[in-house]
């Protein structure tokens, strides 16, 4: 098998059609959406119907030689549990799909549907994370994985640390690389020291350093900084597909790491795939040969 690349943070949806804090989110044509009452380019313009499907993503993955992807959820996309159940059944070797739930009853339905993870966009939650403790304990008891994105909020980060210590066998992936461009990012990534099954994934790192743009030298320095804090075995690459590929190609969302001269081959291998393979337990990944571009 060739190189091992696994995407630890991506999104899929059939249609965006929801409200968040009284503001509208709705898929339009040509990759555009109403996002919090503003029209934005949510998807690349060739995705004309607003559908962010597994089939289109698999085509991108095959082209970029990405063997598998973790699909998380965000409230801004609406609840996609039913669609992700179908995706998981159809493509069990390529995807690890996360359900959305905030109660034990909802989590039981997610588990019964065949999904073994739950994604919580904590940065959009109101109130204390303590109310989610029964959910976290249920997930720990049932071997589920928690994908947790946190806000720039020391109180919330502290509550997440308490949950990690209360549930020592719960696998937790902290998203968006701890929001590395915010003041509290070190507090977030240091959560990996609070539990033996806590990892940090970089979904959205190209968005966080968008003003600098490719090849994102500050992002490379931040990856090394986080590795110094918690170790290379806790870090995973994530793309935040598809929103990030309105600015760059899918391959570019990881090849700035692959081409960096500041990281060793062993460090790149852990970050780009080996850690995620172990953390999520992917098996039977395809061998994806490089296909030459016509323009080369």
Image (cartoon, grey):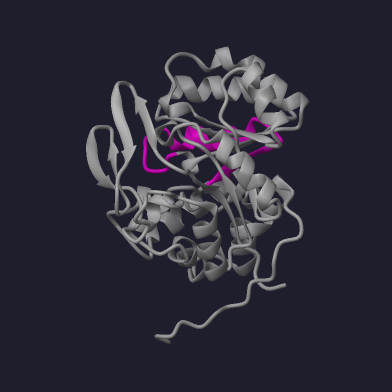
Please state which of residues 95 and 274 is positioned toward the viewer in this rendering. 95
257 is higher (above) or lower (below) than 110 = below
Residue 97 shows up from this direction: no
Q: How far across and down, in percent of the image, does residue 110 sit?
A: 65, 29
131 is higher (above) or lower (below) than 122 = above
Counting the numbered discs, the total is: 0
152 is higher (above) or lower (below) than 2 = above
289 is higher (above) or lower (below) than 29 = below
Q: How far across and down, in percent of the image, does residue 194 sit?
A: 64, 30
Q: How far across and down, in percent of the image, does residue 224 sit?
A: 51, 54
**Which contiguous range is marked in magenta?**
179-201
Q: Extreme left residue here? A: 38
At 75% across and 30% down in the image, what residue appears?
169
Quarter in which the C terminus is drawn: bottom left
Quarter in which the N terminus is drawn: bottom right
State which quadrant residue 2 falls in.
Answer: bottom right
Is residue 4 found inside the magenta-colored segment of the image?
A: no
Is residue 183 found inside the magenta-colored segment of the image?
A: yes
């Amino acid at each position: 098998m060739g190189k091992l690349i696994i995407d630890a943070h991506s999104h899929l949806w059939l249609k965006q059609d929801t409200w968040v804090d009284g503001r509208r989110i709705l898929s339009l044509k040509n990759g555009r959406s109403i996002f919090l009452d503003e029209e934005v380019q949510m998807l690349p313009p060739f995705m004309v119907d607003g559908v962010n499907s597994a089939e289109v993503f698999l085509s991108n993955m095959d082209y970029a030689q990405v063997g598998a992807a973790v699909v998380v959820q965000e409230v801004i996309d609406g609840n996609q549990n039913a669609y992700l159940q179908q995706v998981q059944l159809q493509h069990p070797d390529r995807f690890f799909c996360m359900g959305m739930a905030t109660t034990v009853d909802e989590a039981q339905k997610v588990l019964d549907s065949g999904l073994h993870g739950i994604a919580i966009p904590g940065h959009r939650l109101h109130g204390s994370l303590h109310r989610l403790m029964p959910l976290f304990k249920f997930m720990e008891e049932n071997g589920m994985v928690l994908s947790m994105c946190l806000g720039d909020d020391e109180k919330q980060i502290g509550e997440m640390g308490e949950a990690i210590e209360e549930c020592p066998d719960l696998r937790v992936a902290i998203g968006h690389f701890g929001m590395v461009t915010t003041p509290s990012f070190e507090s977030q990534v240091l959560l990996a020291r609070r539990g033996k099954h806590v990892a940090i994934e970089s979904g959205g790192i190209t968005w966080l350093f968008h003003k600098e743009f490719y090849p994102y030298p500050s992002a490379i320095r931040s990856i090394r900084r986080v590795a110094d804090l918690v170790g290379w075995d806790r870090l995973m690459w994530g793309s935040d597909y598809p929103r990030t590929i309105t600015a760059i190609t899918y391959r570019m969302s990881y090849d700035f790491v692959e081409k960096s001269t500041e990281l060793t081959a062993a460090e790149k291998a852990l970050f780009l795939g080996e850690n995620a393979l172990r953390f999520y337990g992917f098996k039977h990944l395809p061998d994806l040969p490089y296909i030459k571009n016509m323009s080369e």
